[in-house]
Amino acid sequence: MAKRMTPEGRRLDRARAEEEARLWVEADLRRLEQQRASSIEAMAEEQRRESRRLEELMPVSARLAEMFREVERSTRSVRSCRLHEVAVRLRQPSADCIHVSLRWGKKFGLTDADKQLMRSYKSRRRRLQRYPDVVVGHEYCELSAVLDARAGTLRLGSGATYDIATFVANPSVVGPYIQQAVANPSPICTNYHRCDDYEKR
């Protein structure tokens, strides 16, 4: 016949079970905290690597930007446009990349007045004669290139891709692309039509 447990024995058993459960919970919390700390450190290390890779690309992007500025200075069709600029954008189109571009044309983006007019039409839709059939969002030509630190490549707007080391050794490899893009530019246009509620199509 099994010996009956006394109230004190039952209390001690419950206490031991509760202590074991507490220790398991604490162990799980420590493991989760270690995983979180490891994840944070891994992300920080990846960000440091990205920053180092971008820093290594800075002289290359500066050389490419200077080539585009020379085109901007020496090309009458570019200088004669109302708008023209050379821009260097870090972490575009992704974290390991630098986007370098020369843009020239009539319009680089919607103005505040454009946006207000489009919002007004969508909310009111009155007196249609006040609203143009088309709002021009962009109208420009562009030379562009993307330096990809992770892949070690220079990708031109034409689609041609070179090793960055090749460009560093011989910057003239981008010459044919520049000449073609300036001689036969492909305009980039974005229009917003009133019949589409000025939504991009």
Image: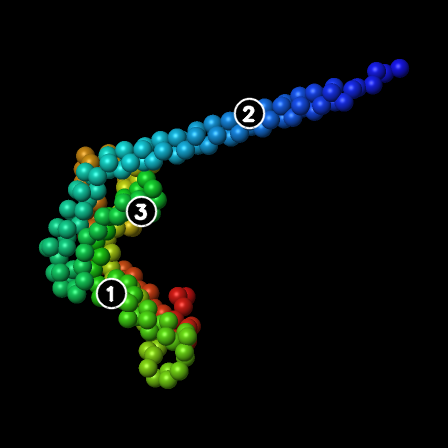
Residue appearing at x 24%, y 65% in the figure: 107
For disc 2, the marked residue is: 27
Looking at the rendered structure, which numbered label has been put on residue 107?
1
Asked whether the viewer can see residue 173, the reply is no
Q: Position of residue 124 (x, y in %)?
A: 41, 78
Q: Position of residue 37 (x, y in %)?
A: 43, 30
Q: Label 2: state its secondary structure.
A: helix
Of labels 3 and 2, earlier in sequence is 2
Residue 7 left/right relative to 59: right
**Vertical comparison of 140 with 70: above or below:** below
Q: In the rendered image, which quarter is residue 129 located in?
A: bottom left
Q: In the rendered image, which quarter is residue 40 located in?
A: top left
Marks 1 and 2 in Cβ contact (< 8 Å): no
For disc 3, the marked residue is: 92
Name the amino acid, label 1: Lys
Q: Which quarter of the rendering shows the N terminus? A: top right
Marks 3 and 2 in Cβ contact (< 8 Å): no
Q: Label 3: state its secondary structure.
A: loop
Q: Position of residue 179 (x, y in %)?
A: 19, 52
Q: Distance of mark 1 from mark 2, alpha carbons?
A: 61 Å
Which residue is at the front of the view, 162 or 147? 147
Residue 32 left/right relative to 57: right
Q: Distance of mark 3 from mark 2, alpha carbons?
A: 43 Å
Q: Distance of mark 3 from mark 1, alpha carbons?
A: 21 Å
Residue appearing at x 18%, y 47% in the figure: 65
Q: In the rendered image, which quarter is residue 173 located in?
A: top left
